[in-house]
């Protein structure tokens, strides 16, 4: 093995570990410490370890879990936000899966492939929406996230209501910014394509695709700040 091959292997191996850690690591949510969160509760378990709690959380596709070490109580939540219903209660610590932050939004990578509608539903279950791109800066950021994925990627745009009229799903507003792969004639509505994707064979450019195809996806939600 020459030095170039060795270096390439190191880079590929490191990229692989980053990808898997993004899906499996939990980060301490300091803002919710010493609070009992009541909302979005999936299940509550007693007498288990934090590791068991995180494992069950992953199985349940949770985004957040709370752990109280005195009573070894674990609460698994669909998601925890600062505005989640909570009361003060000592001993609770919270952990959540990683969201990437850019400007006033945060983003989550959907690794498991789903149809456009199912991807949108999964985003909704996290208090989010399929990503909606409103500037070239956001477009560039989303491209860097999409490069961490391995397949085509769903975005939140569609023309399923009126053919050729592309809107963002959450608001129904027309695209104010777009970056269609016009060099490849996109959107071409080939076999009635009505959903917006970053199409990997064309270098993750904007293409219309069939909504029933199963792709990876990116969810987006606004960052809520409290004063
Ligand atoms: Ca179409
Ligand atoms: Ca197309």
Image (spheres, grey):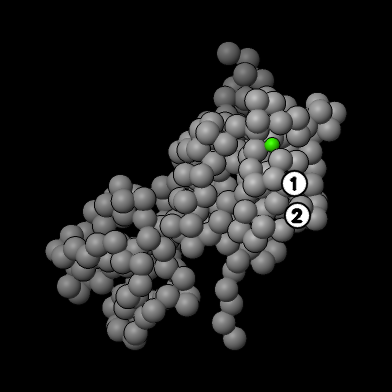
Query: CB of mark 1 within 8 Å of CB of mark 2?
Result: yes
**Residue name at image x 41 percent, y 63 percent:** 79
Q: Distance from label 1 to label 2 (Cα)?
A: 7 Å
Q: Secondary structure at mark 1?
A: loop
Q: Position of residue 67 (x, y in %)?
A: 28, 68
Q: Position of residue 158 (x, y in %)?
A: 65, 45
Work out whether residue 36 can be spotted: yes
Q: Secondary structure at mark 2?
A: loop
Give the mark count.
Answer: 2
Q: Position of residue 102 (x, y in %)?
A: 67, 60
In the picture as drawn, the residue positioned furthest to the left comes out as: 47
Q: Nearer the viewer, residue 155 or 59?
A: 155
In the picture as drawn, the residue positioned furthest to the front comes out as: 162
Q: Quadrant of residue 1?
A: top right
Q: Nearer the viewer, residue 189 or 138?
A: 189
Q: Position of residue 221 (x, y in %)?
A: 58, 62
- Going from N to C along the chain, the mark reached first, 1 or 2, is 1
**Residue name at image x 18 percent, y 60 percent:** 48
For the C terminus, give its image quadrant.
bottom right
Left or right, 55 with respect to 167, comes to left
- Image height of 206 relative to 29, above or below: above
According to the picture, the residue beneath numbered tag 1 turns out to be: 165
**Residue name at image x 73 percent, y 47 percent:** 166
Work out whether residue 141 can be spotted: no
For the residues carrying marks 1 and 2, which lies nearer the camera in this image? 1
According to the picture, the residue beneath numbered tag 2 turns out to be: 174
Q: Is mark 1 within 8 Å of ligand 1?
A: no
């Amino acid at each position: 093995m020459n030095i170039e091959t060795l270096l390439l292997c190191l880079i590929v191996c490191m990229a692989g570990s980053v990808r898997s850690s993004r899906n499996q690591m939990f980060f301490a949510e300091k803002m919710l410490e010493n609070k009992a969160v009541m909302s979005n509760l999936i299940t509550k378990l007693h007498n288990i370890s934090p590791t068991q709690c995180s494992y069950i959380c992953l199985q349940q596709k949770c985004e957040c879990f709370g752990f109280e070490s005195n009573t070894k109580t674990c609460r698994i939540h669909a998601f925890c936000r600062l505005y989640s219903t909570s009361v003060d209660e000592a001993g609770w610590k919270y952990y959540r899966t990683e969201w990437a932050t850019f400007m006033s939004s945060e983003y989550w990578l959907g690794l498991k492939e789903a149809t456009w509608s199912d991807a949108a539903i999964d985003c909704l279950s996290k208090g989010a929406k399929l990503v909606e791109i409103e500037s070239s800066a956001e477009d560039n950021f989303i491209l860097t996230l999409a490069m961490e994925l391995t397949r085509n990627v769903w975005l939140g745009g569609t023309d399923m209501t009126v053919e050729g009229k592309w809107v963002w799903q959450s608001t129904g507003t027309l695209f104010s910014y777009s970056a269609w792969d016009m060099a490849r004639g996109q959107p071409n509505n080939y076999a009635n394509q009505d959903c917006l994707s970053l199409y990997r064979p064309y270098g993750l450019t904007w293409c219309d695709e069939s909504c029933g195809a199963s792709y990876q996806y990116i969810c987006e939600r606004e960052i809520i700040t409290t004063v």
